[in-house]
Amino acid sequence: MKAFRAAAMAAIGAAVLAACASAPPPPPPERTLRVNVFPGSTNAPILIGMERGIFAKYRLTIELQNTPNSDEQRAGLAAGKFDIAHAAVDNAVAMVERAGNDVIIVMGGDASMNEFMVRPEIRSFADIRGKVVAVDAPNTAYALVAKKILKNNGLIEGRDYTVRNAGGTMSRSQAIASNPELVAGMVNPPFSFTIREKGLTSLGRSLDLIGPYQATGAFVMRPWAAANADVLERYLAAYIEATRFTMDPANRTVVVETLVKRFKLEPAIAEQTYAALMTPGVGLARDGRFDMAGFQTVLGLRAELEGQWGGKPPAPGKFVDLRYYDAALKKVGAQ
């Protein structure tokens, strides 16, 4: 009898263990993430991910914040006012090099849809001589792109033109369109299309004028990433999945309708913006991948125009940590 009871207990224990082994793991805890961005179409994957429940699938609630300029965004990230920033990744480099912040870039986003937009009276780069160019922060990101484009065309800041702070792309485009003193600036969609209706024209895309450039990406404080690795990986996985949805031609109508609604665009402008987002080498990067060659351009501009690092860019690994992205890609499966 004792042997029978022992055998029965062993069988029950084995059954319990088998049931536990086959039970699905508990879902991860729900989290709210504060994500800070510049208003613009490069945020399409985030907007789509929020609207289509993709972030919710990963048990994430996104609190989306708009920043008026890069100075406030960099200061806010360093102060812990939000968790994740999406902007031109040169801002992360500036945080490390100029402010001593422990920041890492964790993902790409787009390859810079910026165009060098000018007022109607400007017909060539030579016409900018003696005039004012609108920028965000004068020593980061697209301001450096503008300065490099002008340098390639024989114009040097301080000698041939000056720059003036006018805020992020939305504010900058409005300033160029309304203020005759500001004759040019880098502008991306949808604003590069809306200001065309006011007579402004393009002297070329940044890709064509200076080559590949790693533009928007996600960056975070390194200690926050280490303490919240699972949450960050879930966020990046959701972003990747949302990017795939956004770039799937079958979802064109959904994406265009989102652009119309979010940015109060005319359908024709939304269609143009969608086309720009889908343009290879210019628009959204597949799976939000980081373009290391384009990032070399980012570092090269800073070295050349700001004289940083003695004119010789450091290795990208000082600023980039893609381990969280790689883990996220495994969650969704590579394509």
Image: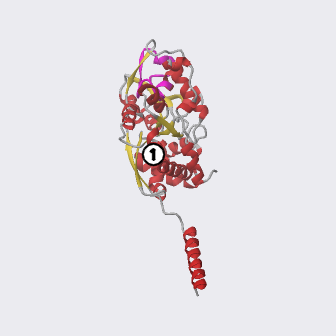
136 or 97, which is in the foreground? 97
Q: Nearer the viewer, residue 202 or 17?
A: 17
Task: Say if residue 210 shows up in the picture.
Answer: yes
Viewer-proximal residue, 198 or 296? 296
Which residue is rendered at x = 52% and y = 54% of the image? 253
Instruction: From the viewer's perspective, tell me whether residue 296 is left or right of residue 85.
Output: right
Specify whether residue 131 is painted magenta. yes
Does 101 sit above or below residue 39? above
* Residue on which the image places disc 1: 227
**Colour option used:** secondary structure
Q: Quadrant of the N terminus?
A: bottom right
| Residue farthest to the right, as pictured | 335
Query: Magenta part of the protein: which range?
Result: 120-144
Q: Position of residue 136 (x, y in %)?
A: 41, 29
**Residue 150 visible somewhere in the drawing:** no
The percent position of residue 255, horizontal first and vertical second, equals 50, 51
Give the image location of residue 4, x and y in percent. 60, 85
Direction bottom: furthest residue? 1
- Check if residue 240 falls in the magenta segment: no
Residue 37 coordinates in the image, percent (x, y): 42, 41
Relative to residue 303, is residue 216 depicted above or below? below
Q: Quadrant of residue 51?
A: bottom left
Residue 130 sits in quarter? top left
Q: In the current view of this chain or complex, which residue is farthest to the front?
A: 2
The image shows residue 7, relative to residue 300, as above or below, that is below
Q: Is residue 143 above or below residue 65?
A: above
